[in-house]
Image (cartoon, grey):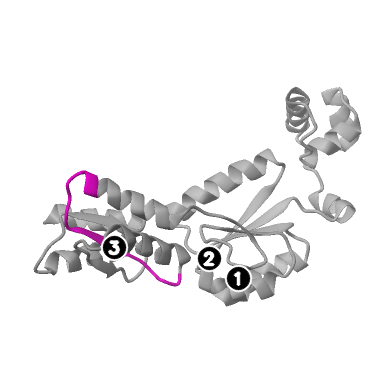
Amino acid sequence: MSIEKVARVAGVSTATVSRVLNGNPGVKPDTRDKVLAAIAACDWQPNLLARQLRTSRSRMLLVLVSSITNPFCAGVVRGIEEEAEKQGYHILLCNSESRLNRESAYLQLLSGKVVDGVITMDAISCLPGLTTLIGNAPWVQCGEGNTGYNASSVTIDNHSAAESAINYLSGKGYQRIAMISGDLRYLYSQQREAGYRAAREGAWQAVVRAEGLEYQAGYLAMATLFAAEEKPDAVFAISDSLAGGALHYAHEQ
């Protein structure tokens, strides 16, 4: 089986088949569908290694996540994969647990040209080590803002978002609004806690920093809040997993 036969079956040129395989956005959707259908009908597997040697591009992206069990990470990965496929790329997902030695092993795929770029979801405190490992390769950091590292970044205004959440609760009439914060190695934790304190300036405050980002950590943090003499009437949790654990404890009470 060859690219020439796929082209004949699809009724297009071999150049068009090559553009489809390389994810060229200039191919019309109906033409792309014809080529993909021909590939399926012929049961053809392109020689990806040969194409990589010819073009010096693998069309693979390395995605490093700290914990794939974190609902936030899982949602971001789904979005990355969907957009990557639209652009003709595939992803290689690695659960790094934010351990630099593990990330170092994965990032050797960059120097070996196995992947064309890397997307990370690490704490801001991990970025100096990653900068050394990644060098000048294409790099996007998700969730944590770019604070001068050699990476583009995708994030939100965490400070304003936290303020908005607290103002919403205040507007509902809640007066003792507590916060379950998280690991301050993460920039978003620092920024959301600062937003909470700014919104609660001069008002009742209580902050508990969870020992981790997991469901159980939220459960234990809520137990700490409930054990205080003056209990909150509303709680702002820094993440969905912590909020889930906190709600579990609250319902038990």
Task: From the viewer's perspective, tell me whether residue 105 is left or right of residue 213.
Answer: right
Q: Residue under label 2, please give it.
A: 122
Label 2: how many Cα within 10 Å (few below 14, some 14–19, many 20+): many
Q: Residue under label 1, please give it.
A: 103
Image coords of residue 10 (percent x, y): 82, 25
Residue name at image x 62 percent, y 42 percent: 83
Which dot marks residue 180? Answer: 3
Residue 61 lies, with reference to residue 125, above or below; the image says above
Which amino acid, mark 3? Ile
Task: From the viewer's perspective, tell me whether residue 145 is left or right of residue 150.
Answer: left
Label 1: how many Cα within 10 Å (few below 14, some 14–19, many 20+): many
The part of the image, by quadrant, that contains residue 109 is: bottom right
Q: Of label 1 and label 3, which has the lower sequence position?
A: 1
Residue name at image x 86 percent, y 32 percent: 16
User: Do residues under tags 2 and 1 come within 8 Å of each other at their CB atoms?
Assistant: yes
Q: Of label 3 and label 2, which has the lower sequence position?
A: 2
Residue range in magenta is: 170-185
Task: From the viewer's perspective, tell me whether residue 12 is left or right of residue 167.
Answer: right
Residue 236 lies, with reference to residue 96, above or below; the image says above
Residue name at image x 29 percent, y 49 percent: 167
